[in-house]
Image (spheres, rainbow, N blue to C red):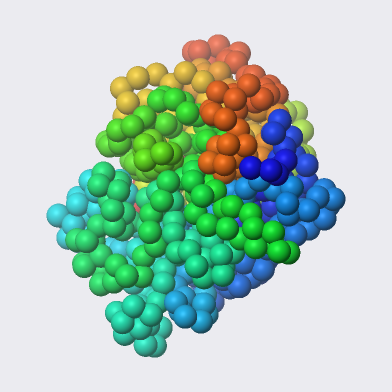
Amino acid sequence: MSGKFIMSLDQGTTSSRTIIFDKNQTIISKCQQEYPQIYPKPGWVEHNPLDIYNSQYSTAIDSMLQADISPSDIAAIGITNQRETTIVWDRDTGIPVYNAIVWQCRRTADLCEELKKDREFTQYVKENTGLLIDAYFSATKIKWILDNVEGARERAESGNLLFGTVDTWLVWKLTDGKVHITDCTNASRTMLFNIHTLKWDKKILEKLGIPESMLPEVKNSSEIYGYTDILGTKIPIAGIAGDQQAALFGQLCFDKGDVKNTYGTGNFILMNTGTKPAESKNGLITTIACAIDGEVTYALEGSVFVGGAVIQWLRDKMRFFSSAQDADYLGAKLMASEGVYFVPSFTGMGAPHWDMYARGSIFGLTRGTTREHIIRAALEAIAFQSMDVINAMSADINDEIGVIKVDGGASASELIMQFQSDITNKKLIRPVIAETTALGAAFLAGLAVGFWENRDELKNSWVLEKTYTPKMDRAEAQKLIKGWEKAVRCTKMFSED
Ligand code: ADP
């Protein structure tokens, strides 16, 4: 191991980014490139797999130029990626047979409804993959490609096609088609992976008609998978995790009970549940947090679909302000939202409510309601929705959650963070490095090549930026929570028919 830096490839839904870290976890350079979103029909979302790869590769090169370093300075590459997004390509030519079907794409919703009619299968999927049958996960997206792209099924059955999530596709491209692998965290989002046996599940593959020969080999999240040649230098690719699992690792949530919440477009709350999977009875999913040296750590996960996106909506559609930061300033002009509640379930409700048909609603308007009330209610809603997931987690593990580690764009909001602490009655901590997703992938790669010796060493360099502790009177918090619960009930009622 000769390099002085770790390169983290952070392949997101709207952009590809590369961040280079040094041994002290300092960011040496950071490059980002957006790439086109393709919306062929309402509810359908696709990416061109070559756009994904090309934008990722060019940010990798740019990041080295920006830092004025050469490929030989890079000790290893880590990859973190948008999860579930599905790519199928030709084993020999490397040409994708169809665009990448993105995690947000709802085209297989009807197929999922059909599958759910088989109660026994639904239960089997939950018990063995940890997931609820949903169009979100890769399995039905692969089936769609095999059923709808001319000749795809025959080619797949004759062993000519390969499937991969975005990590798999990037590794395959970076190794010139030599390595077809994924890691356990990404495999656990396909709805095809048995999280107990750690093998592809034959029963589910058979039910969906997906040939096992298409699937990548499943590896640890931290090991050398292969080498990429950049300008004549071979660099090991040594760490992979899906974005939310990478953030959990980047937040140093290594121990059972550790929780992180990423406040981005949506809110993603994950709790490390240790080496045994915890089954949720409260609307969460069970997933793999990471696999290192053959030891698997599991997590409970709850996703809130609309988090920071409600602020974007107020900015772009309501034109209440011109930048997300202004929301905080305007919302903080009031001491409270004074009975106004905003349930921003624009695309249905995620965990723990799972109501696909719910739509957004605002309650408690009076003649005195101002723009500031609605903004404040929207900011509070980001915290209330996270609270619902956190409470579901506590119920699942039958224990109190101690501290919540926070990151993501909207964790910059003082108002959301303090309110979150107040209503959950919990301490929140925010690290200096907000790029926890990229950092997590860097950690996994760095550990695999001995750049960092062990997890304790990682803890030594982690720097806290800010702590939030509850300040609100508990009775007042309870009153606000009651109002929120009523608003959620009414929102669900409105979509009942
Ligand atoms: P993603 O990775 O999902 O694109 P980011 O972590 O970059 O998301 O966070 C962006 C989101 O955070 C946007 O939806 C934006 O509206 C929200 N956001 C950013 N700053 C603030 C703020 N100060 N207050 C509230 N929301 C914010």
**Foreground pick, 269 / 20:** 20
Quadrant location, the N terminus: top right
Q: Do we see residue 174 in this rendering? A: yes
Q: Position of residue 177 (x, y in %)?
A: 52, 70
Q: Position of residue 339 (x, y in %)?
A: 56, 30
Task: Give the residue at the far bottom of this rendering.
Answer: 150
Q: Position of residue 306 (x, y in %)?
A: 54, 47
Q: Position of residue 297 (x, y in %)?
A: 38, 35
Task: Give the residue at the far left of this rendering.
Answer: 120
Circle count: 0
Q: Which residue: 51% across, 36% down? A: 248
Question: In the figure, is residue 261 to the left or right of 117?
Answer: right
Q: In terms of image quadrants, where is residue 437?
A: top right
Reply above or below: 313 against 433: below
**Foreground pick, 175 / 153:** 175
Q: Do we see residue 373 in this rendering? A: no
Quadrant location, the C terminus: bottom left
Q: Which residue: 53% across, 47% down? A: 239
**Foreground pick, 14 / 295:** 295
Q: Which residue: 59% across, 48% down? A: 78
Question: In the figure, is residue 55 to the left or right of 272?
Answer: right
Question: In the figure, is residue 26 to the left or right of 416?
Answer: right
Q: Which residue: 65% across, 63% down? A: 229
Q: In terms of image quadrants, where is residue 461?
A: top right
Reply above or below: 430 against 116: above
Reply above or below: 7 against 293: below
